[in-house]
Each structure stands twice: as C-alpha cells, then as structure tokens.
Image (spheres, rainbow, N blue to C red):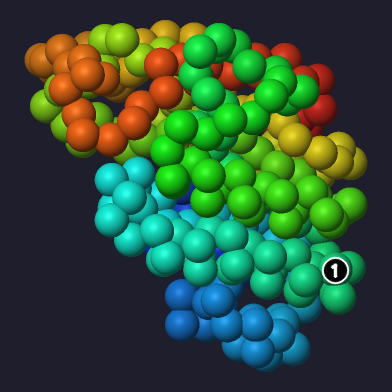
C-alpha cells in the first residue's frame, strides 16, 4: 500500500509524531483539515486526497480530564469515531482504530483479544464506545495498546499497576506492521508484562523514579491491564 494512500488522524499527538519519523509520506491532516466531529469537512478532505487506509489515533485521552469533561470524550471518542466509520463504509476504506488496554477491568492481566471488556473509568468507556462503532464495520482492525513518551514524563510511577506499555516509538513501529496485514478484528500490541514503575525505569535506567500507589490518585486505575500479544506476532508484516 502506497504511503500517500494512508491518512493518519491525530498526527500532532505522541503516536503521530513517532509515525512521522518512520512513515513520513503518510497524509497527516491537521485537526482543522480532518476533524472527526465534522463529517462534511472529512468528506471534503477525501475529495482532494485519495485514500485506501485510515489510521485513527485522534482522541481525547486524559482520564482525569475526561472525568471533568465527559461530553468532550463523547463527541470525540464515540461520535467522532462513528462519523469516521460511516466515512470508511461509504468510500470502502480500511480502518485501523487505536484503542486502549484500559477497556479491561484490570483484575486478571495478560488479556487476550477474546476476554471480557469492562472499563473502570470514563475515558476507557469512551474508547470502548469507539470500539463498538468500529466493530460494525467489517474492514477494520482494533488495536488495543498502551504507550508513553521518552523520557517518562512524571517523577513517580505506579508500583502496583501492571501493563504491557512500551515507548511510543516502539508502538508506532509495531502498529506499522499491521498496514499490509489482511487481518480483520481486534489485536493487542505491546511488550512484556511489568509494573509501570519498571516500564518507566526501562526508558532511562540511570534516572531516579519515585514509587507511587494507585491508592494515591483521585481517578480510577485498573490494577493489571497487561496484554497477551501473541496474535500480533502471528499477523504482523514489518514494513
């Protein structure tokens, strides 16, 4: 698939910034050019740019901010994603939707793609709402993942929360391996199970990171959303 036939939403975000480094010829429209809450604007952009695949990473992503502004999450993460699904259906465009490991309850860990979904905060519910829209479109991939910037942006990290999180750079490279895959459905993308504290230390082993408990924050945090990523290994086709 030609890079110029791919649109990436949320190109100014963390994941989009890393995609630009490895796939610079993908189309990265600005929010004003391709606002998922504006169906007419998206159609106008498609009239000017031929497209075979959309990677949808644009989202309202902060759990504490979503708690304060749930309507914004509704408009962007659920309604906006549904708008994009309609667009892909109309123009027969394949869709890769970037979801989150937070759609799981967090009481188990090493979740497979077939395990039950049960978000524990409003942000995750909004992303699951987006998943529901994408599930109604057969030509789509739902990517459940977790990533962060390098270096770790906080002074403290959870010692009692487990994850498969990796750097945004690594996750961008892994997701790019799905561009040429014929797979349809949900797939988990991430690394080995470890605490958020261990993940933070892995980004810079020489840096001092202080310990933090999930009991010390004001928003709900799932205990263990680590992912079983074996399916990804079987279907990925590195570019």
Image coords of residue 199 (percent x, y): 34, 17
* Residue 73 position within the rendered picture, expressed as x and y whole percent measured from the top left: 45, 60
Vertical order, 184 against 118 (above or below): below
Assign the C terminus to one quadrant of the image: top right
18 or 185, which is in the foreground? 185
Residue 218 placement: quadrant: top left
Tally the marks. Answer: 1
Q: In this image, 161 relative to 232: left or right?
A: left
Which residue in the protein does label 1 denote? 89
Work out whether residue 53 or residue 62 is closer to the camera in this orientation and state it. 62
Residue at 83 percent across and 54 percent down: it is: 136
Image point (42%, 38%), residue name: 121
Q: Position of residue 132 (x, y in %)?
A: 71, 50
Left or right side of 228 for 208: left
Residue visible at 72% across and 56% down?
A: 133
Q: Is residue 150 above or below residue 156?
A: below
Question: Relative to residue 157, is residue 161 drawn left or right?
Answer: right
Q: Quadrant of the N terminus?
A: bottom right
């Amino acid at each position: 698939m030609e890079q110029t036939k791919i649109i990436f939403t949320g190109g100014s975000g963390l994941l989009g910034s890393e995609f630009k480094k490895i796939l610079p010829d993908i189309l990265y429209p600005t929010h004003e050019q391709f606002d998922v809450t504006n169906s007419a604007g998206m159609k106008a952009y498609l009239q000017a740019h031929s497209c075979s695949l959309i990677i949808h990473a644009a989202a309202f992503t902060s759990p504490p901010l979503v708690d304060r502004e749930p309507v914004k999450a509704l408009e962007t993460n659920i309604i906006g994603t549904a708008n994009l699904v309609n667009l892909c259906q109309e123009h027969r465009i394949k869709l890769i939707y970037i979801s989150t490991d937070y759609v799981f309850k967090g009481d188990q860990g090493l979740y497979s793609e077939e395990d039950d979904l049960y978000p524990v905060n409003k942000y995750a519910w909004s992303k699951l709402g987006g998943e529901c829209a994408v599930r109604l479109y057969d030509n789509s991939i739902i990517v459940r993942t977790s990533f962060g910037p390098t270096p770790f942006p906080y002074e403290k990290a959870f010692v009692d929360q487990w994850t498969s999180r990796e750097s945004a750079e690594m996750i961008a490279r892994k997701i790019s391996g799905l561009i040429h895959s014929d797979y349809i459905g949900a797939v988990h993308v991430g690394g080995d199970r470890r605490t958020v504290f261990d993940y933070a230390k892995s980004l810079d082993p020489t840096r001092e990171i202080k310990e933090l408990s999930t009991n010390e924050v004001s928003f709900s945090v799932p205990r263990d959303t680590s992912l079983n990523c074996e399916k990804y290994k079987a279907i990925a086709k590195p570019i």
